[in-house]
Image: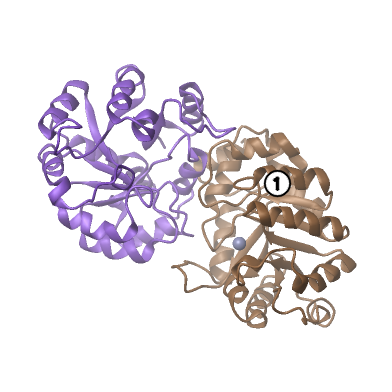
Amino acid sequence: MELRDHAVLGRELKDTFVVDVHTHIGSHNNYQRVGTDAEAIIHTMDRLGVDKILCSNSPGAYSDLRWGNEVAAKAHTKYPDRILALAVGSPHCPEIDWDDYFIRDDRFFGMKAVPFVQGQQPIWHEGLMPMYEYADKKGLAVLFHAWLDSETRDAIKVAKQFPNARFILGHAGYTAREAAVEACKQCDNVILETTFSAPIEGDLEWIVGKVGTDRVAYGSDLTAFECAHILGSILLSRLTDTEKEKILGLNAKAFFGL
Amino acid sequence: MKFLDARIQLGRSCMPHEGAPNTTEEILEVMQRCDIERAIASHAIAKESNMQAGNEALLALTGEGTPFLRQWYAMPSALGEFFSPEELFRQMKQHDVTSLRLMPKKCGHPIRPYVLGKLMAAAADCHVPVFMNLHEDIAPDELYDLCKYYPDVDLVICRVDYRQNRVIGPVLEQCPNLYIGTSIYVVHSGLKLLSDHGYTDRLIFESGLPNGSATAAVSLIRYAEISEEEKELIAHGNMERLLSNVRL
Ligand SMILES: [Zn+2]
């Protein structure tokens, strides 16, 4: 059975290692989100054959970080092999002692920065420097919301300044795709992630053609929205099965040492 | 599972997206890859600049021997700039055009009956479904009024995004003539949610090629946690039912 046949039949991937590097737990007032708790997420992962996810709390990013991060950590405790928690930072909370998350608490895998929803702040922000310095010191993964060209350009600056941290550019390859290509050229510590709620046919093949198969990783933004459309579009793309396997999980495995 | 795609655009766009399937041949290749057997097609020129020229250009690319069913763009015509409803539907019959698409926002006309009443009455008489894209053609908070102004017209609203449940929920409940295009309805478990609420018959598969993703749109349906019968309805059955009602 070829990989595309799974999407044709709507069947879960069984013998393919699949990592979703961009997911969220928790509901938010801004629109109706469905199946946002750990059990519903695991159910969806099982239905599609997703092995592991990198997961941050969504509502906490807009509000009380500690409350939100605790939700993600608890999900990890419940499903330690499946849900890897990302701790969300904020430009408004430079005082966070990251040892609380990564030394005194061992439930977190990496970090998430989405200053755009925290008062439309930029990624290159003084208040976020302690977070990046910590990630650099520990070689941690940091997921960026890199939707805008300006966010992606800022992410390049951060990735260059903090070369030991591992940066995921969320939503890369769509609205800011030229900048995302630039990020891959300039920074070895950057990987692009595939999420978009309204993708355009051929965008995946375009970005892979520009940056190579090793620099793109599957991500979905589950549960902010569905994950099956992006997974299926990878499976039904014009890429080879070897390329698809890299994007679905092997690149994340290598990049993060999973 | 085979698909009937309710929204494809043919013809050269003013701004082709690099990497997207921008020719008819490339669109056909994607359709084949996604098991899309047939598609309702309109023309880029009609959308982007001139309705009459685009509608005419569509004829050469569609119809017999192609997988494309014809859809024309239309606008109201009080002062004679577009076909009268009588003439429009006569020409539609002649050219086997079985659905219409409106762009109230772009064309600068309200959706209210004093403007669209005659055109919509003709669509209702012939059971011709009328399509629009959410946001681009009509605002979410106009949906309810649109459906209530024209209760006898089947209204297919495409590009309904994942943030619209609080609008489409009440409108689906109160307006049986609303149909939701699924291309970017990427609510997590969203098709199951609408199906659980009894709205399977109101969901229409559309990809939006070349400006949308067919590989993504078919995957939403194939991976949905609903029965095979429900998937078949969304993939093609519901749209076939609407088209089978057309009497030109
Ligand atoms: Zn996200």
Q: Is B43 situated above or below A144? A: above
- Quadrant holding the N terminus of chain A: top right
Q: Which residue is mark 1?
A: A179
Residue occupying the point 33% across, 39% down:
B236
Q: Residues within 10 Å of mark 1 (few under 14, many from 20)?
A: many
> Is A208 left or right of B142, judged from the image as shown?
right
Residue B93, above or below A16: above
Q: Can you tell which quarter of the image residue B11 is in?
A: top left
Residue located at (53% from left, 51% from top):
A228
- Return the residue nearer the eye: B212 or A43: B212
The residue at label 1 has a CB less than 8 Å from ligand 1: no
The reply to whether residue B152 is in sight is: no
Q: Which chain is purple?
A: B
* Residue B207: x %, y % from top left: 43, 40
The colour one sees for chain A in the rendered image is brown
Asked whether the viewer can see residue A198, the reply is yes
x%, y% of residue B177? 21, 52
* Residue B160 appears left or right of B64: right
Given residues A201 and A71, the one toward you in this image is A201
Taking the spot 30% from the left edge, 57% from the top edge, the residue there is B199
Ligand number 1: quarter of image: bottom right
Q: Nearer the viewer, residue A73 or A135?
A: A135
The chain ID associated with circle 1 is: A
B155 shown above or below B70: below
Quadrant for the C terminus of chain A, please.
bottom right
Left or right of A5? Residue B182 is left
Q: Which residue ends up furthest to the front in the rendered image?
A: B79
SS under mark 1 = helix
